[in-house]
Each structure stands twice: as structure tokens, then as C-alpha cells.
Image (tube, helix red, strand yellow):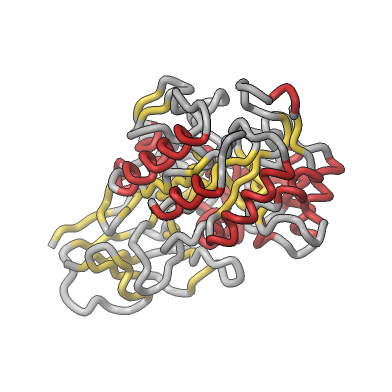
Amino acid sequence: METLLYNIGDMLSGKFDSPKIKADSLVIDEDRIVSIGKEPSQSPHLSIDCKGMTVAPGLVDTHVHPTIGDFGTKQQSVGYLERMVHGAVTHAVSAGEVHVPGRVGADSALAIALAAYYSYKNYGPLGIKVHGGALLLEQDTEINHIDQAFEGGVRIIGEVGIGSLKDPKRAGELSTYARDLGMVVHMHCGATSDRGAGGEKHPYFSADDVLTVRPSIASHANSFVSLSDEDVDLVCDHKEGPPFIEVVQAGGVRSMLRVVERLMDRGGLDRLLVGTDTPTGYGVTSLGIIKTLGDICSMTGLSPEVGWAIASGNAARAFNLEGHKIIEGAPADLVVIDASLGSPQRSAMDALAAGEFIGVALVITDGKIRVNGSQCTLRSRRVASINKI
Ligand SMILES: [Zn+2]
């Protein structure tokens, strides 16, 4: 049961160092990409004429706050995960199930992380993969809570600083333990977002705190209230700074550009991650990753192909996720994108470079067409022609 995509204009690899592929077709068999630029081995049951549009790996949102199912308590919203797929996102990574009510300490934080991990492991509307279950660190969190989370399958520590543990030194001990186990540790940067106990005692997480905690990711360096300019520079430049630095849609634009330009100057763009930090008080942002990429590319001159690789393959590397690259054998989680109808731009990449919203024509997850004409973007300039044989 092969599917052929042909007449592809730009094909993006999701690879940071070689972001474009010189080929105009690819073949999917069941849920995998089986060949690129070759004829199908048998008559395909579905052929998709891409009409010169761009084919790219689905995007990864590295900073989502899920609760349970497709419901977000913070915005009282239903269906935000499904809408993210309409915005070309095929993988959402939890930075902590912070909006699940009833988290009062380490035991409940552990239970919530395990429940989210197991639930989202088997649930993703329109085929979105949700890496749920990010253990939040509380004042009474002990090593055994991390061990139990790890044994249960949880591989993420949610943003250090949004649980009740505010002491960077103690958080650093737990972060180091978790990272040694192979877990990925997010750390909240900037002003605290926790209205619970302890927030007033530690209202701002600085570059010094990041260097003390030693997380995997300095999360939202451009938070609601960003790191200061000096702290942005220190996190980016310090030789013991975190392996990844994240910018988000729900944050300051000026500090986001400072992070990106700083990393560009120093040849460190492979440390950059792009998330939305939603659903939060900021809202639900179905097009948050696309918008952030357009902002970055149009205002820093970053090549949109490299930008797309940062938000797909590079993000997958940060969390050890399978796929998000166009290579033979990878999961077939793909998007077909274009400039929007009415745009003066000729392609999706030209549109991103101009800071425009792109049109999402098709989203394919697990080898199946889940979105044919996004309900969230404008219509794409061209429309794919789908033929069943
Ligand atoms: Zn967050």
C-alpha cells in the first residue's frame, strides 16, 4: 500500500547541516518513508501531485503544557492539539503538566506525570505524537520520585522552577541525577510563573540559576518576562551553559531575536529550540511555531530551510524523538506547504523569509492524510491533487 508524492518543489530534510534534498518525489509505505527520488516499487494506491509545493517534516513544538486528552484547563479549550496539526506540528513535547489541578507535592506530581505519560503514549488526535509526562520538582521531591518516574517510562523533567522547588542548589542535585539517568531537563527562565508557595521568594530565574541547575534546556529564554540582556548573553556564551536554549511564541520578541542572533554569531544554532509555551495565559496558538519561524527568519536573515530544520530534526534530537527528518525509513509525518493564496511570494520558504504565514495544504501523519486544507492557515496558493488508484 504505497503512496507516491510527486511534483515536489522544495524538499526539506529537517537536517541542520544539509536542509534541502535534491529530489522531486518520495514514496511512503504504510507509516514510513521508503524511498526518495525513486520510482515506487509497485503501482501506488494513492498518488499526490504536489504541484511544485514544498514537502517538509512535521514540526515539533518543544514547549507545550498538556493536561489530559485534548483539553487545556488554562484556556478552558478543547481541541488545541488537533488544531496544532492544522499548524504543521506533528509532535508536541510537554514542559510539565502544570495546569492539572490538585498537584500539592512530590507524590501528586509523580502521579500526574505518570498518568500523562501513559495516556498520551496512546492518544494523539489526527496522529499528533504527544510526549507527555514531565515530572515537576517539588520541595519534597526525592531521588526515589525520579527513579519511579523513570521506571514508569517518563523521560522528561518539567520546567525546573514551576514546581514548588525554588532552590537552585537542590534543583541542581536532582537535575544532575535525572540527566545522568538519561532524562531531559527543562528549566524555566525569567520571571516565575508559579502562583503557589515559594514564588515570591524566588521571583526570577537568572543565568546564574541556570548555571547552578545545569538543565538540558534553558526554556523560554524570552519568557513572559524574559531573561535580562546580560543573562541572555551569559546563558548563550558560558562554556558550561545548557546544551539547548529555547525561544517561544509566548514571549518577548526582542529577547528572542537577541538569543537567535547571539547563537548565529557564535555558530551555535544547533542549540536553538522553538516552542510555543501554550496553552497558557497567553492563549492557544495553533500557528505558533510557523509564526515564530517567520518572525525569526524575516528579522534575522536566518535561512528558512535551516529554521525549519531547527524546529523539526534539531528538536527531535534534543528529546531523542524518532523522525522529523526526511530520510528513508523515517516515520511518514510530513507536511505539504506553500505561500498563501494571494501572497506575492512564490513558495513556502519565500513566505517564511518574508515573515508571512504559510499555507498548510496537507498534513500526513503515520502515512495517512489527516489534513487536506488547513482550517487554521490561509489557503495555500496551489492545491494538491490526490488520486486513488
Ligand atoms: Zn512553560
* 176 with respect to 330 (left or right): right
Q: Is residue 297 visible?
A: no
Quarter holding residue 247 = top right
- Residue 278 lies, in percent from the top left, at 52, 33
Which residue occupies the foreground of this view, 382 or 280? 280
| Above or below for 200 versus 333 | above
The residue most toward the left is: 389
Instruction: Please count the marks in the image.
Output: 0
* Residue 99 in picture, x, y percent from top left: 48, 27
The answer to whether 340 appears left or right of 388 in the picture is right
Residue at 48% of width from left, 23% of height from top?
Answer: 74
Residue at 57 percent across and 25 percent down: it is 282
Q: Evaluate whether residue 103 shows in this view.
A: yes
Vertical placement of residue 210 versus 14, above or below: above
Residue found 43% across the figure and 67% down from its top: 326
Residue 251, quarter of the rendered image = top right
In the rendered image, residue 82, in percent from the top left (x then y), is placed at 35, 37
Q: Which residue: 38% across, 40% down?
A: 116
Quadrant that contains the C terminus: bottom left
In this orientation, which residue lies closer to the viewer: 322 or 142? 142
- Residue 311 image point, x, y percent: 55, 53
383 on left or right of 253: left
Compared across the picture, whether 359 is left or right of 140 comes to left
> Ligand 1 sits in which quadrant?
top right
Query: Which residue is most to the right?
Result: 230
On the rendered image, what quadrant is the N terminus found in? bottom left
